[in-house]
Amino acid sequence: MEPEARILNSRQVSLVAVFAALSVAVIMFIPGIPMIGLPGARITLDAAVAPVYGAIIGPYLGGLAALLGGLVVAGFRGWPIFSILTSFCPAVSALVAGAVTRKTVNVAGLRVRGWILGALVITLLIVGWYLTWVGQRAPFYPAIHWAGLALILAFRGRVSSLFDEGGKRGLSIAVFIASYCGLVADHMLGNIIFITGVGWFIPLEALESVLRSMNLPGVPALFMFMLPISTVERAAMALIGMLFGTGLVFVLRSSRLMRIAGRD
């Protein structure tokens, strides 16, 4: 079960530290994917494994581990504002994945079904997209995010059942769904941060230069141009998360460490 204590105990601190260190290692030593529209920026590949943190140690501890890993690297690189803000992206991913793989989670002292929390987070992010000026000009862009929400609503509590009791095949399905849903939440938050940062910490001149080089009329067109690429990227990351997560869960279960991680 997900720990409900407000102050972390030594076991929880250790779990957060282990997965935060894993994030740091992945970000620092595995090359990321170049980000179109922001020269020099990269999509770090901790995004692919962050959902697994949530599935194993829970939405809150997993989210905290992913956030701390990103912030440590941001500090090492001189605290660039974009790196600080996007550290919250894998944290949201772990939150969503951890929620949908649990039957219930604690929300403000109340026990609610995990899939409801996961669906709510993605819904809020999609609404956030449509509140931006780019979202209003690119209404079909959140197709992959709507797909993530649809998966949660279609499977609901079956994801947590498959994770806990589904055998190897069921576990793989559960981890893939959780990873995909977490990754599209991560992606949408990153989109909103990018849009908000244009003209602030994302130089408008540099972005306009990119648009001219790609012969695109504006930022909304850039997002629509990127949609097929983002679709393949998120699906591939979900597959990586499934392979990594399924293997790690089997190792932890065989060594009886899942109970230590907070899952019976």
Image (cartoon, helix red, strand yellow):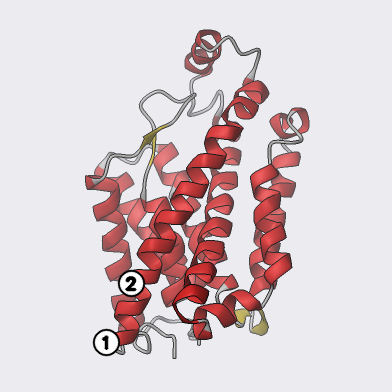
Q: Position of residue 5 (x, y in %)?
A: 48, 86
**Which three-letter amino acid code belongs to the residue tagged 1?**
Ser
* Label 2 element class: helix
Residue in the foreground of this view, choosing between 15 and 140:
140
Give the residue furthest to the front. 169
Task: Specify the quadrant that holds the C terminus.
Answer: bottom left
Q: At 71% across and 50% down in the image, what residue appears?
A: 146
Mark 1 / mark 2, whichever is N-terminal: 2
Q: Position of residue 147 (x, y in %)?
A: 68, 52
Q: At 73% across and 30% down in the image, what residue appears?
A: 138
Q: Position of residue 209 (x, y in %)?
A: 50, 10
* Residue 1 visible from this viewpoint: yes
* Label 1 element class: loop
- Say which mark, if any, is on residue 255: 1
Q: At 77% across and 32% down in the image, what residue appears?
A: 136
Q: Is residue 215 above or below residue 166?
A: above
Q: CA distance from mark 1 to mark 2?
A: 11 Å
* Residue 67 visible from this viewpoint: no
User: For residue 100, which quarter of the picture?
Assistant: bottom right
Q: At 46% across and 62% down in the image, what residue appears?
A: 51
Q: Residue under circle 2?
A: 248
**Which three-letter amino acid code belongs to the residue tagged 2?**
Leu
Residue in the foreground of this view, choosing between 125 and 198:
125
* Count of picture labels: 2
Q: Is residue 132 above or below residue 61?
A: above
- Say which mark, if any, is on residue 161: none
User: For residue 108, which quarter of the picture?
Assistant: bottom right
Near mark 2 (Cα within 10 A), the count class, few <14, some 14-19 or many ≥20, is: some
Near mark 1 (Cα within 10 A), the count class, few <14, some 14-19 or many ≥20, is: few
Q: Is residue 20 above or below residue 11?
A: above
Q: Position of residue 83 (x, y in %)?
A: 40, 41
Disc 1 + disc 2, Cβ < 8 Å: no
